[in-house]
Image: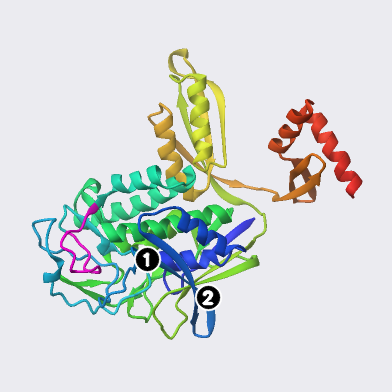
């Protein structure tokens, strides 16, 4: 099974996760070009070599309108700065707070980029700006779904991460999620980090993501209205039910965005599984500590003795066949492992349809939201299942009819080979023959080559 292990022994931040995952790709430069081609307003990605404690890794620099987040003299990260301002439109250059917090200066996205009721602002940006615009969760979704060329799965992942952050801020500040707003500059920077990580996870396509217990740092942080403990309140809320520890390093090591990304994607938080490592990536932070300041990502194969998946199911009796089929398509597009239907009899002898959705734990919330959106069900059941799978990889066969992909599955003493339907269908159309005849033609060519 293809497994991604994230070692968060020095916490996690959006840029560190991006850089660590980027190092796992054989074509990292091309991927950075893809990120810059997305057109996130004002955002530019640049990967930079970085050395910490003699270890070479990558730092991902993200600039917004030519300026990197955290590039000012303020050394604070991810805290709740609740300034008592009655207006959204005010001059930031009159703030006189002490921002020498000694915190983790690694990420671009911090909880102080999120405000509520237009009273909660980041001091991390240029204080000469008299007017700062803010965005709601709805505005973020408009950017992600309406302006960026992303697959539906990546869009759903990005919004799920943002919802975790917004819900945490809502809980901490005691206001509805609809009143949580994001600082304009910080919004673009956070969108960049979150989108990059979601795209990288989609590109790497691990069967399982395992994350170590998370080092959150220790000590306290000085904020405008008092002293707060590490982890910051929003980070602590996001990391509920996650194994975390403080350690001896004073400062904030895990940011809200880093926490939300881990919480969303992790199938489980545990020690490193036994795995045959194929690629290792080091995503470096900015600050130097006695310990190497990085997130380490390891991609490899673990034994296919089984993995845990979730089965979601619901009954419907008021949808047409076309509507059910469309819902199934949307669930697959959102990242379902499998979706299938069964005819059933319901109350008052009404014929109905039982919809089964198979997914990883990390995709569970997305599946639930998608099912409620595209079906008429008012309730969804959940079961945890153990799954046993064969190892799978794709081989490409060159034939006179073009390249044909073949899925090879092996394990438990068996091996199976199956040509991809899309490639066989193309040959069948071109030759005006059946699918089975197209497969026979490919078999003959492959046998001859061998």
Residue bearing mark 2:
57
* Prevailing SS of the magenta stretch: loop
Q: Which residues are magenta?
A: 120-134
Q: Earlier in the sequence, mark 1 or mark 2?
A: 2
How many other residues sit within 10 Å of disc 1, few (<14), some (14-19) or many (≥20)?
many
Residue occupying image coordinates x 16% and y 52% = 117
| Disc 2 secondary structure class | strand
The location of residue 284, given as percent across then percent down, is 46, 74
* Disc 2 crowd, CA 10 A, few/some/many (<14, 14-19, 20+): many
- Name which residue lies at 65% across and 48% down: 388
- Colouring rule applied to residues: rainbow
Q: Residue furthest left?
A: 86
The picture places residue 78, in percent across and down from the top left corner, at 29, 67
Q: Quadrant of the N terminus?
A: bottom right
Alpha carbons under labels 1 and 2: distance apart: 20 Å
The answer to which of 131 and 101 lies nearer the viewer is 131
Residue 52 left/right relative to 185: right
* Residue 6 visible (yes or no): no
Which residue is at a point 37% across and 69% down the rendered structure image? Answer: 107
Q: How many discs mark residues in the rendered view?
A: 2
Q: Is residue 305 magenta?
A: no
Residue indicated by mark 1: 63
Is the residue 409 above or below the residue 442 in the image? below
* Marks 1, 2: nearer the viewer: 1
Seen as rendered, the residue at the extreme top is 349
Q: Quadrant of residue 420?
A: top right
The tag on residue 359 is none
Identify whether 252 is placed above or below 309: below
The answer to which image quadrant residue 67 occupies is bottom left
* Residue drawn at x 47%, y 57% as measured from the top left: 35
Disc 1, SS: strand
Return the residue nearer the eye: 133 or 341. 133
């Amino acid at each position: 099974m293809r497994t991604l292990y994230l070692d968060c022994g020095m916490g996690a931040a959006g840029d560190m996760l991006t850089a660590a995952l980027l190092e796992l790709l054989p074509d990292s430069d091309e991927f950075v070009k893809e990120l810059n081609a997305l057109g996130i307003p004002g955002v530019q990605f640049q990967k930079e070599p970085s050395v910490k404690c003699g270890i070479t890794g990558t730092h991902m620099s993200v600039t917004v309108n030519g300026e990197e987040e955290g590039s000012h003299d303020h050394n604070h990260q991810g805290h709740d700065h609740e300034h008592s301002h009655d207006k959204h439109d005010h001059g930031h250059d009159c703030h006189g707070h002490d921002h020498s917090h000694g915190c983790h200066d690694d990420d671009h996205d911090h909880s102080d980029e999120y405000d509520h009721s237009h009273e909660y602002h980041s001091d991390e940006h240029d204080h000469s700006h008299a007017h700062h615009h803010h965005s709601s969760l709805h505005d973020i979704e408009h950017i992600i779904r309406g302006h960026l060329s992303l697959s539906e799965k990546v869009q759903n992942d990005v919004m799920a991460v943002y919802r975790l952050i917004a819900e945490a801020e809502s809980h901490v500040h005691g206001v509805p999620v609809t009143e949580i707003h994001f600082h304009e500059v910080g919004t673009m920077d956070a969108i960049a980090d979150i989108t990059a990580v979601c795209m990288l996870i989609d590109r790497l396509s691990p069967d399982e993501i395992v994350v170590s217990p998370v080092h959150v740092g220790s000590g306290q942080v000085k904020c405008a209205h008092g002293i707060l403990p590490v982890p910051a309140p929003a980070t602590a809320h996001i990391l509920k039910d996650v194994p975390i520890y403080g350690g001896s390093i004073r400062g904030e090591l895990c940011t809200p965005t880093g926490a939300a990304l881990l919480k969303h994607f992790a199938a489980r938080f545990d020690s490193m599984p036994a795995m045959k490592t194929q690629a290792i990536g080091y995503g470096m932070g900015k600050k130097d500590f006695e310990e190497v300041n990085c997130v380490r990502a390891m991609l490899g194969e673990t034994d296919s003795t089984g993995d845990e998946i979730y089965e979601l199911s619901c009954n419907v009796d008021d949808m047409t066949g076309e509507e059910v089929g469309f819902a199934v398509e949307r669930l697959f597009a959102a990242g379902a492992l499998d979706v299938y239907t069964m005819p059933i009899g319901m109350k008052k002898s009404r014929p109905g349809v039982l919809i089964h959705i198979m997914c990883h734990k990390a995709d569970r919330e997305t599946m639930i939201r998608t099912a409620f959106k595209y079906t008429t069900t008012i309730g969804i059941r959940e079961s945890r299942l153990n799954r046993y799978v064969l190892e799978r990889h794709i081989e490409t066969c060159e034939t006179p009819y073009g390249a044909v992909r073949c899925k090879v599955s092996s394990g438990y003493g068996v091996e199976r080979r199956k040509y991809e339907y899309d490639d066989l269908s193309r040959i069948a159309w071109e030759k005006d023959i059946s699918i089975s005849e197209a497969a026979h033609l490919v078999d003959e060519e492959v046998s001859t080559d061998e």
